[in-house]
Every structure is written in C-alpha cells, then in structure tokens.
Image: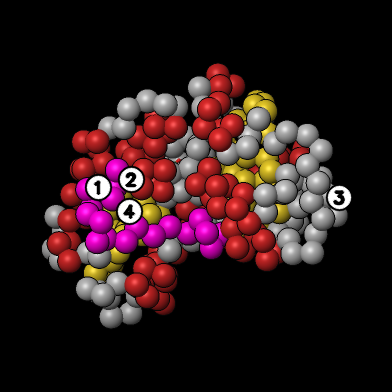
Amino acid sequence: MQPDAPILLFDSGVGGLSVLAELRKLLPQAPVIYASDQAGLPYGTKTEVQIATRVAGLLGRMSERYRPRLVCIACNTASTIALGMVREVLEVPIVGTVPAIKPAAAMTRSGVIGLLGTAATVRQTYVDNLEREFAVGKTLLRHAAPELVEVAEAKLRGGPVDRKAVAAAVAGLRNQPGGERIDAVVLACTHFPLLREELSENFGSDVALIDGAEGIARRIADLTRGQEFARTGPDRAITTGPAEYLEALRDSLTRHGLDRIERF
Ligand code: DGL
C-alpha cells in the first residue's frame, strides 16, 4: 500500500462532510479525496436504477483514476441501494453508511424512534430489515424530508437556513400517531447532521439525534489499521458538477481540510 494512497469519500453533495469530520478525528494524517456528485444531486428523489447505475459507474471510474486504498459511500441513499452492487465490481474495501437504527433502538426509553431520510432511503427494504433485526418491540416512524438536502447545501454555502423547511420535517414525524413520544431520531441522510442544531431546536433537547458518522469513521480506521499514511499534497474535493459550485463552498471545504478543488 502506497502511503499516499487516499481514502475516497463519496456523496451526492456535501453530506459526506459530516463523515469526514469524524474521520479527521481518528485519522488526522490520512490523505482524503472528497468526491461529490453534484451533477447527480439530489439522489433522494431518483429511482433505484438511476442511483445504482450512477453510483457504480462513477465509483468505478474514480477508483481507476485515484487508486484509493478504501472507498466510503458517505451517503445513506446510495449505500442502501447500491452497496452490494459496488462491492461486486470494485476490488478495494468499501464502507457504506447504514441508518443508525441499532443504536437508536438501544437508546430509546419511550420505545418510539423517528427516522428522517430521503424519499429513496425511507422506502428501502434495507431499512425494513434493520427495523426487523434491531427494533423488535419498538415503533419506528419514518418521514422523507428530501428538501432538507438543499437546506444543508445552502447552509454550507454560507446562506441562511430555511427554518420553515426544518420545522416541517420535524412535524412530519411528530404529527404521526405516537410521534409525540419520539425520544430518539435517526438522521438517515448524511446531510442532516449538518442541520443538527436547527433540528434539535425543533425536536427539543430531550430528543437524541443519532447518525452513523462516528461508527463509519471507526470502521474505516479498523480496516486501515497498520497501514502507513503520508499526505504528499493538499487534500482535494472533486465534483462532477461545475467547479464554481464547490468554489461557493470553499470556506466549508477548507474547514474540513480540503484545500484543492477539482472537476472530475
Ligand atoms: N447525503 C445523501 C444521503 O445520505 C442524500 C442526498 C441526496 O438526496 O442526494 O442520503
């Protein structure tokens, strides 16, 4: 393994930065390429076939070009749909993003858990299976809030947060039968932890907001244990969209240690 071989983090947009923030804490010396498929954003309103073919195709091309030591699909929508397919075609280790139903189920006292994700994620059998396996005897209420993806993107561009959209997403869970008893909410979209403060204001401080970022970072650290890391240049953010889009995010990217922006 070349010490400068990067870890490739992939998302449709800026959501994967919530995973990168945790990864930096564990592996501060690891070279990282942050890839955002802005030409395909948003994923959450696309069909399964559109998402699977796009993600598998792009990750194949990116792996050939950048030779990563590991690929992390830092996106719940892409992972719950395409993880198996991507693992079949790529030879590098792939870490996916799984909605954090297991820790939420262990944490709830009321027995009612909320789940916020994109429309594509909340309808996946992958989520049904996690519920069946880990939330036995609990109630899992799901709500699709795809509009929060753009709210998070806008926030990281330095714009104002659409608080009405955040309140509507929270109401989408609270207004379901039993919703008033929710005491743990799974943030099943990597964009949503970027709105943690605003979501918490709406849910109230006694509701735990749980995402998988820390667990994903730990998994990456486990899989790369014993490997050497050497950053020979600045870490890059690459995008399938216009480079100006990432330019508008430059401050947020720099805060995450991504000092170079390139078009893929
Ligand atoms: N960040 C992605 C996720 O975790 C979804 C964003 C999108 O809809 O493209 O689900």
Q: How far, Cα to Cα, is label 1 from label 3? A: 45 Å
Q: Nearer the viewer, mark 3 or mark 4?
A: 3
- Residue 134 position in % (x across, y down): 40, 76
- Residue 47 position in % (x across, y down): 43, 45
Task: Give the residue displayed 36% in from the left and 47% down from the top.
Answer: 196
Q: Nearer the viewer, mark 1 or mark 3?
A: 1
Task: Give the residue displayed 41% in from the left and 70% down from the top.
Answer: 103
- Residue 219 position in % (x across, y down): 62, 63
- Apparent side of residue 191 relative to residue 232 in the rendered image (left or right): left
Badge count: 4
Residue beneath label 4, please? Answer: 116
User: Where the C terminus falls, by quadrant?
Assistant: top right
Identified by mark 2, the residue type is Glu
User: Where the N terminus falls, by quadrant?
Assistant: bottom right
Identified by mark 3, the residue type is Gln
Q: Earlier in the sequence, mark 3 or mark 2?
A: 3
- Disc number at residue 157? none
- Apparent side of residue 201 relative to residue 245 in the rendered image (left or right): left
Task: Give the residue displayed 70% in from the left and 36% down from the top.
Answer: 235
Q: How far, Cα to Cα, is label 2 from label 4? A: 15 Å
Residue beneath label 1, please? Answer: 201
Look at the numbered disc 3 and say if its residue's Cβ is closer than 8 Å to ligand 1: no
SS state under label 4 = strand
Residue 242 placement: quadrant: top right
Task: Give the residue displayed 22% in from the left and 64% down from the top.
Answer: 182
Quarter for ligand 1? top left
Outermost residue to the top: 244
